Amino acid sequence: MSILESPPIGDSLIELEEHNPARKEPFYLAKGWLLWAYKLLTVIQTCWQFLKLVTLTNQSASIGATAVPLPGVSTGHLLVTWYARITTVDPVNSSLTVTIGWLEGGVALTLSGAAITGNLTTSVQGLAVPIQVDANSAITYATTYASNTPGTMRYSLRVTVTRIS
């Protein structure tokens, strides 16, 4: 069953004011379409809400736990996604690990992706993590960086936070 029924396509979109057809503007939105539009608005208002995108480029060091700058977050389910890519390789080897942190039920939680060790500009990692957060708690991102020649490997990172309920 869908969240929103199909629009009343078989019904007229516009109706004529039957009680006062001489009115200056005697046409109005038909009741079936008006009710459907109201339900559509309700569904839109309860859909996923994009909160923030953090984009970092040309990074060449670890990043300590950094809060995603969010407006006051109420308790609820969020979806945190990240996408990391090696943009410049170290000729020998390198490694990058992304970690997301949040607070749930007063307990500090973290989740880390696998270390990106491909040492190619095609080395990427993306992950979507649904989390439950406490009201007004920070969602953080961090990276652990290692490069055979310090500062040689470079990477980009995108972190997105979306409210899902």
Image (cartoon, rainbow, N blue to C red):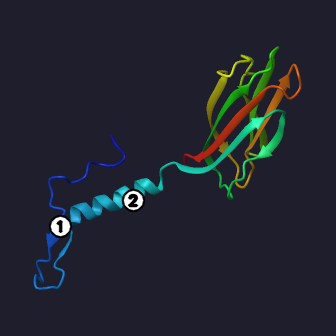
Residues marked 2 and 1 touching at CB (< 8 Å): no
Give 99 or 4, whichever is nearer the viewer: 99
Q: Is residue 104 visible?
A: no
> Which of pointers 2 and 1 lies earlier in the amino acid sequence?
1
Residue underneath mark 1: 14
Q: Amino acid at mark 1?
A: Ile
Report how far apart the C-alphas of labels 2 and 1 lie in the structure: 19 Å
Q: Residue at x 27, y 64 (%)?
A: 34
Disc marking residue 47:
none
* Mark 1, other Cα within 10 Å: few <14 / some 14–19 / many ≥20: some
Q: Position of residue 13 (x, y in %)?
A: 19, 62
In this view, 152 is above or below 3: above
Indicate the secondary structure of the residue bearing disc 2: helix
- Reading the image, the residue beneath label 2 is 41
Q: Residue at x 43, y 54 (%)?
A: 44
Q: Mark 2 or mark 1, which is nearer to you?
A: 1
Q: State the image coordinates of residue 105 (x, y, percent, origin top left).
A: 73, 45
Outermost residue, top side:
92
Closer to the camera in the image, 13 or 55: 55
Residue 77: image quadrant is top right
| Quadrant of res 102 | top right
Amino acid type of the residue that numbered disc 2 sits on in the rendered structure = Leu
Callout 2: 10 Å neighbours few (<14), some, many (20+)? few
Drawn side of residue 16 relative to residue 148, left or right: left
Q: Secondary structure at mark 1?
A: strand
